[in-house]
Image (tube, rainbow, N blue to C red):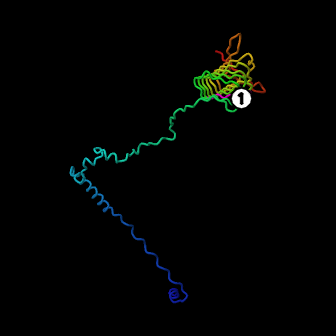
Amino acid sequence: MFMRSVLTSGSCASPPLPPPPPPPGPPPIFDTETVKDEGTASRSALFAQLNQGEAITKGLRHVSDDQKTHKNPSLRAQCPSVRSPTKSHTLSPTSPKNSPQQSHAPVFELEGKKWRVEYQEDKNDLVINNTELKQVAYIFKCNKSTLQIKGKINSITIDNCKKFGLVFDNVVGIVEVINSRDIQIQVMGKVPTISINKTEGCHIYLSEESLDCEIVSAKSSEMNILIPQDGDYKEFPVPEQFKTAWDGSKLVTEPAEIVG
């Protein structure tokens, strides 16, 4: 009683605490009966329409023959063609596209100090005369053809040729055969080096003066060197298989002999 009188009559007493908030109301009630009644009413209306039988089509508008596209060609011409969404008419970026084979004009000319013999087909009368020591010859993509080079020239390159024949007098540098097939070379004079690289089938006819020629080959097959003997040529194959062994200080490589 004393404490209550002090709190109520004292001028310095603190104000009373606010009342606690009211308790939360009840959760909302989901009216399942109303939803059930609405779903039942919708199904009943749908069944009622289906039970009409033939009478269900009475509300449809009749389309005359002049309004049907399969009977009126003018309507088909006005309607744009629609592509099926299930079929793609775009080319796949990975699908190969057959490009037509390009045909190049044959080339036989002297360009500066370089003889260009390119894209020759079935030509067996090609001749290069009046050569100089500083000139070179580049033969590219010639097929079933033969070329004769007279005089002395610096170097000769045969690149990407098939069934091609070359006859030359003298070369002071090197004769190279690259990426070719079925090549025949005849040396009439001298040549220090002949290189064969990535070539299938190469026959080289050496002269008496060019027997000291060095043959360098890599990634090639069916190579034969023909040496003049008694007025004829004797054929010697270039080894394609090698064996390598350690002799204690270095690797030693020599042709492998295949025993049949």
Residue 71 in percent (x, y) is at 28, 44
Q: Is residue 139 magenta?
A: yes
Residue farthest to the right, as pictured: 249
Which element carries disc 1, helix, strand or loop? loop
* Label 1 packing within 10 angstroms: few (<14), some (14-19), many (20+): some
- Which quadrant would the C terminus be assigned to in this image? top right
Residue at the location (50% across, 36% down)? 97
Residue 158 in percent (x, y) is at 65, 27
Q: Give the residue number, with chain letter if any, for mark 1.
A: 135
Residue 235 in percent (x, y) is at 67, 15
Q: Nearer the viewer, residue 215 or 144?
A: 144
Splitting the image into 4 quarters, where does residue 236 fall?
Answer: top right
Q: Amino acid at mark 1?
A: Gln
Residue 178 in percent (x, y) is at 65, 28
Residue at the location (35% across, 64% down)? 30
Residue 253 visible to the viewer: no
Residue at the location (70% across, 10% down)? 231
Q: Nearer the viewer, residue 1 or 179?
A: 179
Splitting the image into 4 quarters, where does residue 255 fall?
Answer: top right
Q: Is residue 53 left or right of residue 73?
A: left
Q: Nearer the viewer, residue 243 or 157?
A: 157
Q: Is residue 145 magenta?
A: no
Question: What's the magenta region?
Answer: 131-140
Q: Is residue 32 left or right of residue 141?
A: left
- Reply above or below: 128 against 75: above
